[in-house]
Amino acid sequence: MMNIAHAATEGGIAIHLSAPVLGHFFDIPITSTLVMVWFVMAILIGIAIYSKHTLKMVPSRGQVVVEALIGSTYEYIAETLESRELARKYFPLIMTVFIFILSLNWLGLLPGVSSIGIHLELHGEQTLVPFLYPANTDLNITLAFALIAFFTIQFSGIAAIGAFKYAGKFINFSSPLAFAVGLIDLISEIARLISFSFRLFGNIFAGKTLLVVVIFFVPYFVPVPIMAFEVFVGFIQAFVFAILTLFFIKIATSEPAH
């Protein structure tokens, strides 16, 4: 399921549940949200390669600020997990998820994204199909992030305390109460897939739709504060996704209480 909202060139606003498809590659649809993901990946990889070759033993002010931010974040993760060994394992993933989601959210607000594209016939009418569209308005992509977080959490628990002991958190026949608690915990684990993906998707999709509606009806001045608010929302959603992944890893790697 994919979603998109855009202003039609004529006759008002159109909101569709399926993202427009730019083309196919071996019957695999290439959507503008998927192209956006590739675009942001290329930018981040380019920044990483450039940063690697510009690091200095005597750091500049910018490098000092970046190193301080990364260092303080690492210390917070190590303190939360109560283990520097676990922090070394999961810090790269948590930071990558945060930076990637944040970049997708912020770059999705740039001028030209969702407004530059080609005209194709969709739903029986000529519609502008953008080359790039905010990726997290696509439930497929937020679900992919949720799956990464979900399997990372399960892997961290199994690796930390062992497969049998980890499974014992959810399947416990020692008493009816322990069995019921374990069953509830198991349902909660699976429900995280829904909460992770729909929280991110819902907030970004709602914000993008609001912006389209406001720009269409009140194109001057009013969209500016809403755009600023969406910058804030984009940061908060990336932060919440990363911090919840961290907290659930902490819970998964803890010894069972029963």
Image: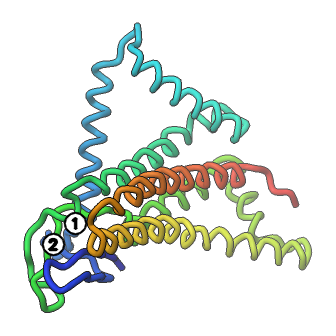
Secondary structure of residue under mark 2: strand
Q: Residue at 38% of width from left, 63% of height from top? A: 136
Q: Are marks 1 and 2 in contact (CB under 8 Å)?
A: yes
Q: Quadrant of residue 229?
A: bottom left
Q: Quadrant of residue 26?
A: bottom left
Q: Is residue 157 above or below residue 187?
A: above
The residue lying furthest to the top in this view is 58
Q: Is residue 105 left or right of residue 157?
A: left
- Other residues around mark 1 within 10 Å, as few (<14) / some (14–19) / many (≥20): many
Mark identifier at residue 63: none
Q: Amino acid at mark 2?
A: Val
Mark 1 or mark 2, which has the lower sequence index? 1
Q: Nearer the viewer, residue 74 or 229?
A: 229
Location of the N terminus by quadrant is bottom left
Observer-nearest residue: 236 or 29?
A: 236
Of the 4 image quadrants, the one containing the C terminus is bottom right
Q: Where 124 falls versus 188 (above or below)?
A: below
Q: Residue at the spot x=63%, y=38% of the render?
A: 77
Position in image of residue 88 (x %, y %): 57, 34
Relative side of 22 to 54, left or right = left
Q: Is residue 67 above or below residue 78?
A: above
Asked if residue 151 lies left or right of residue 30, the reply is right
Question: Which residue has dot 2 on it?
Answer: 129
Q: Which residue lies most toward the bottom here?
A: 124
The image's mark for residue 32 is 1
Cα–Cα span, label 1 and label 2: 8 Å
